[in-house]
């Protein structure tokens, strides 16, 4: 079952926050969005826990002419207070071909706050 409109809108906003350079650079902001048990399977094939993700984002180079857009955003309720989110990211870098990736996240409602407990990014080739 799909999440209701308000839940889906909120989860999309949370995903979009994690794409914002100022949020990605803020250990506090990222810490507030990720659950303590968070794990990520990165598009590089590496596995990251919460602290590794925060450290990695702190060292991420700022790409001033880069825009990321979310398309094909969908939700699926897995259990009460647990939602799978899937979408496609198109990363536009000035003067380069766009980079496409498929994303999936699992969000869990904990003390009235949504926290991401899992994320995976997979690069895809566009024809």
Image (tube, grey):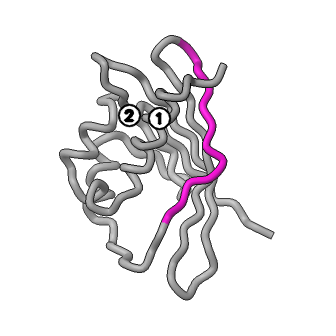
Image quarter of residue 31: top left
Quarter the C terminus occupies: bottom right
39 above or below 6? below
The residue that mark 2 highlights is 38
Q: Which residue is mark 1?
A: 118
The picture places residue 16, in percent across and down from the top left corner, at 43, 50
Seen at 52% across and 37% down, the residue is 105
Q: Residue at x 55, y 88 (%)?
A: 95
Nearest the viewer among 102 and 38 is 102
Main SS, magenta region, reads strand
Whole-number angstrom distance, CA of label 2 to CA of label 1: 5 Å
Q: Residue furthest left?
A: 28
Q: Is residue 66 left or right of residue 50?
A: right
Q: Are marks 2 and 1 in contact (CB under 8 Å)?
A: yes
Q: Which residues are magenta?
A: 68-79
Point 62% across, 53% down: residue: 71
Residue 1: image tag: none
Q: Give the farthest residue toward the front.
A: 5
- Indicate yes or no whether the magenta region holds residue 46: no
Classify mark 1: helix, strand or loop: strand
Describe residue 87's horizontal placement relative to residue 25 as left or right: right
């Amino acid at each position: 079952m799909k999440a209701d409109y308000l839940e889906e809108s909120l989860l999309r906003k949370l995903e979009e926050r994690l794409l914002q350079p100022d949020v990605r650079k803020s250990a506090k902001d990222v810490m507030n969005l990720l659950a303590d048990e968070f794990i990520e399977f990165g598009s590089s094939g590496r596995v990251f826990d919460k602290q590794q993700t925060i450290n990695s984002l702190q060292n991420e180079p700022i790409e001033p002419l880069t825009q990321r857009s979310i398309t094909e955003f969908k939700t699926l309720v897995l259990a009460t207070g647990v939602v799978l989110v899937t979408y496609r990211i198109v990363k536009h870098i000035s003067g380069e071909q766009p980079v496409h990736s498929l994303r999936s996240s699992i969000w869990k409602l904990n003390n009235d706050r949504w926290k991401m407990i899992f994320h995976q990014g997979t690069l895809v080739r566009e024809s």
